[in-house]
Image: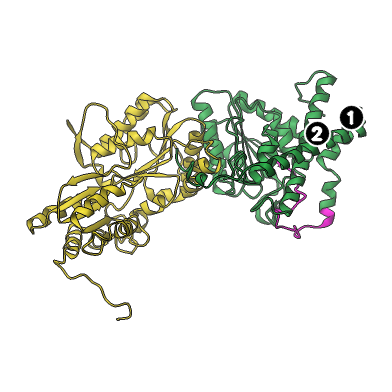
Chain colours: A green, B yellow
């Protein structure tokens, strides 16, 4: 594995795998904490958890240079925000609707943004951010920059017109956008196979002359390898690409969904190939990690998540004056 | 001052702003090689090249969103809709993305994009191509909405719109493109939120915007012959709305007619009539009248389509009603 890595030495490889493990664990623990706080009604509204899908954001964003590249996703966005380097405290404060949140408490779970880190959200309308990503690609081309855009969306978004219109224009104008369908196999409660004319999404770019491939989203190293290759090609050749990352969410669509539309056996089969578990065992097998080291990392990350809750709890709510702020410039 | 068409005034505005700022691009159907469906972008492809004047496929949602995305990361796109009727395809992008990104990111983004094209009825185009959609866009906080009625304003306000850091809905009208007006040689801008008093008067305030202003001014001339001295106000922009200019006038004339060619139900006109009724209650000598489009889809037949729109006669009659020169049509609620 890790065929395409730029890493040469064992030390570098270990460093990279540690980063992957750390980021995936951070997403997992952060979201478990979010679910807990949601249960205590500290967080309201829609809250879509990414648990089970961590390898997708972690493996793919690692292929980017966020000084020049961009990330945009839909409303299941906590994981991408964390991997783009957003502070867990600022994200938790946003979930709490506090003034110290990244969006000053006006966006909530679905609308995390960090313009400095080139993380463009956090978008709540299924498929509506795909043209936005394409427009970012147009800016890169117009200004003759070197960047690449990673545009994430779910299997539910792929049948929206916005996806198809975007791919067509990205191709005719040669925009450096990598369209990533994170296929977690359920568009809310609907099995994607029930509502899709094809089951292999890697063909979805074909009618626009865009190359596609399917990647196992439970394996962070495969995601990293494949997305790295695609990003490199997209950057070099200035062409759009399409990747289906086949993944699975352990939780319901949102907090109110008990996910009764799937079997326990199905869920268990994915838990057995849990992305964190696989990487952990692989690293232990290659003597890059010990059980003790893992526990230490986990403890450290749990503390970070606790700290984020403490920060959110202690942060003030926005003043009523904020209501009319930032409607217009 | 040179006499130029609204079409040419708009073209000059885009040309000057594209020359001034290379982040300004024009994107839309037929804008480049065809020089614009209504020739508003004539010559811009030749001057600025295909990287800045971009023909799109017929994908309104897609290219509107692309304009918004490019704006969020620093370009200043002008998105041309061949007509506002087709903007309905793109409305999700405008309302859910352009109007929201700044607010729901806590002020992290600016979205300097202009959406422009012809709005409202032209001639013989029937129901799907004759809609005046200002109420829908004006309803949405996070957007500015401009609707000029002269060549001077068309140029000055479009330049202003392109320089604005907010998303701007810029409403033109097909029948206005050939109208001529004086446009100075030197550069100028027309700010939003400043209504223009087109005609001073003392007896009744007639307020409108965009294409119907021609009928409003003709109505004022007719009223003059009947001994009525009307004050005419052109709003120029709908959001921001220069309420004070209207109140100032109504507090002088004590009577008000609002003209808006859109449908009457929940319209810009009905909203303005409510504002005047509420804020000038003590000054009003008659209920505010609204002259709107009829509450029907637009028919093709010319006689019928004209009957569906505000006209000089309808505006004159409304002014006469608020002056009690004609009987107002009011009946008890339960009387059939």
Spot occupied by residue B287 in the image (x, y as percentages of width and height):
25, 64
Q: Which mark is residue A289?
A: 1
Residue at 69% across, 38% down: A89
B9 relative to A219 in the view: left or right: left
Is residue A263 rendered magenta in the image? Answer: yes
Spot occupied by residue A242 in the image (x, y as percentages of width and height):
64, 37
Is residue A100 rendered magenta in the image? Answer: no
Secondary structure at numbered mark 1: loop
For the question of whether residue A90 can be seen, the reply is: yes
For the question of whether residue A219 can be seen, the reply is: no
- Is there a contact, CB below 8 Å, between mark 1 and mark 2? yes
Spot occupied by residue B123 in the image (x, y as percentages of width and height):
26, 53
Q: Earlier in the sequence, mark 1 or mark 2?
A: 2
Q: Is residue B164 above or below residue A111?
A: above
* Magenta-drawn segment: A245-266
B194 relative to A32 in the view: left or right: left
The chain holding disc 1 is: A
Residue at 74% across, 31% down: A224
Secondary structure at numbered mark 2: helix
Spot occupied by residue B193 in the image (x, y as percentages of width and height):
32, 42
Q: Which mark is residue B260?
A: none
A102 relative to B8 in the view: left or right: right
Give A68 or A214, whichever is nearer the viewer: A68
Give B32 or B203, whichever is nearer the viewer: B203
User: Within 10 angstroms of label 1, few (less than 14), some, or many (20 or more) residues?
Assistant: some
Quarter holding residue B51? top left
Give A302 or B174, whichever is nearer the viewer: A302
Residue that label 2 marks: A21
């Amino acid at each position: 594995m890790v065929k395409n890595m730029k890493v040469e030495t064992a030390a570098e490889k270990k460093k990279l795998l540690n980063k992957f493990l750390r980021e995936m664990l951070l997403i997992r623990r952060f979201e478990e904490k979010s679910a807990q706080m949601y249960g205590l009604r500290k967080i309201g509204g829609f809250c879509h958890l990414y648990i089970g899908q961590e390898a997708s954001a972690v493996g793919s964003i690692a292929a980017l240079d966020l000084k020049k590249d961009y990330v945009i996703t839909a409303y299941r966005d906590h994981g991408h925000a964390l991997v783009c380097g957003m502070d867990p405290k600022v994200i938790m404060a946003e979930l709490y609707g506090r003034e110290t949140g990244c969006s000053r408490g006006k966006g909530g779970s679905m609308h995390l943004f960090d313009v400095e880190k080139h993380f463009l959200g956090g978008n709540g309308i299924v498929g509506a951010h795909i043209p936005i990503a394409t427009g970012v690609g147009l800016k890169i081309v117009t200004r003759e920059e070197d960047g690449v855009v990673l545009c994430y969306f779910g299997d539910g978004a792929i049948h929206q017109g916005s996806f198809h219109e975007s791919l067509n224009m990205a191709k005719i104008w040669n925009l450096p956008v990598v369209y990533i369908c994170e296929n977690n196999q359920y568009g809310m409660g609907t099995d994607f196979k029930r509502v899709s004319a094809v089951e292999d999404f890697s063909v979805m770019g074909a009618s626009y002359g865009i190359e596609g491939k399917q990647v196992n989203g439970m394996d962070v190293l495969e995601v990293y390898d494949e997305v790295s290759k695609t990003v490199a090609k997209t950057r070099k050749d200035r062409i759009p690409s399409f990747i289906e990352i086949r993944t699975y969410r352990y939780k319901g669509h949102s907090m109110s969904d008990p996910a009764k539309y799937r079997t326990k056996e199905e869920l268990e089969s994915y838990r057995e190939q849990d992305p964190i578990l696989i990487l952990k065992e692989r690293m232990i097998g290659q003597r890059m990690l010990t059980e003790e080291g893992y526990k230490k990392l986990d403890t450290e990350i749990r503390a970070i998540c606790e700290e984020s809750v403490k920060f959110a709890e202690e942060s003030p709510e926005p003043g009523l004056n904020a209501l009319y702020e930032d409607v217009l410039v | 001052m040179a006499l130029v068409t609204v079409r040419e005034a708009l073209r000059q505005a885009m040309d000057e702003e594209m020359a001034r700022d290379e982040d300004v691009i024009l994107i839309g159907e037929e804008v480049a090689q065809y020089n614009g469906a209504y020739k508003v972008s004539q010559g811009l492809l030749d001057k600025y090249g295909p990287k800045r004047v971009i023909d799109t496929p017929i994908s309104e949602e897609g290219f509107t969103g692309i304009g918004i995305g490019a704006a969020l990361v620093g370009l200043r796109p002008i998105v041309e809709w061949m007509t506002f009727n087709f903007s309905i395809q793109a409305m999700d992008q405008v309302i859910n993305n352009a109007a929201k990104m700044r607010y729901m990111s806590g002020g992290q983004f600016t979205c300097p994009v202009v959406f422009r094209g012809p709005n409202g009825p032209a001639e013989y185009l029937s129901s799907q191509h004759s809609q005046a959609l200002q109420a829908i866009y004006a309803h949405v906080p996070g957007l500015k909405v401009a609707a000029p009625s002269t060549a001077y304003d068309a140029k000055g306000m479009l330049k202003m719109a392109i320089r604005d850091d907010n998303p701007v809905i810029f409403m033109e009208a097909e029948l206005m493109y050939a109208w001529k007006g004086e446009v100075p040689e030197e550069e100028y801008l027309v700010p939003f939120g400043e209504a223009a008093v087109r005609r001073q008067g003392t007896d009744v305030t007639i307020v409108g915007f965009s294409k119907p202003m021609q009928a409003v001014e003709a109505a004022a001339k007719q009223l003059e012959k009947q001994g009525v001295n009307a004050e005419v106000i052109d709003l120029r922009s709908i959001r921001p709305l220069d309420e004070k200019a209207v109140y100032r006038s109504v507090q002088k004339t004590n009577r008000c007619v609002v003209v808006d060619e859109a449908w009457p139900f929940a319209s810009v006109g009905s909203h303005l009539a409510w504002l005047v009724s509420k804020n000038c209650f003590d000054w009003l000598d008659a209920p505010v009248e609204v002259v709107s489009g009829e509450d029907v889809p637009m028919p093709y037949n010319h006689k019928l389509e004209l009957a569906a729109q505000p006209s000089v006669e309808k505006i004159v009659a409304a002014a006469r009603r608020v002056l009690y020169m004609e009987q107002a049509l009011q009946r008890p609620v339960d009387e059939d």
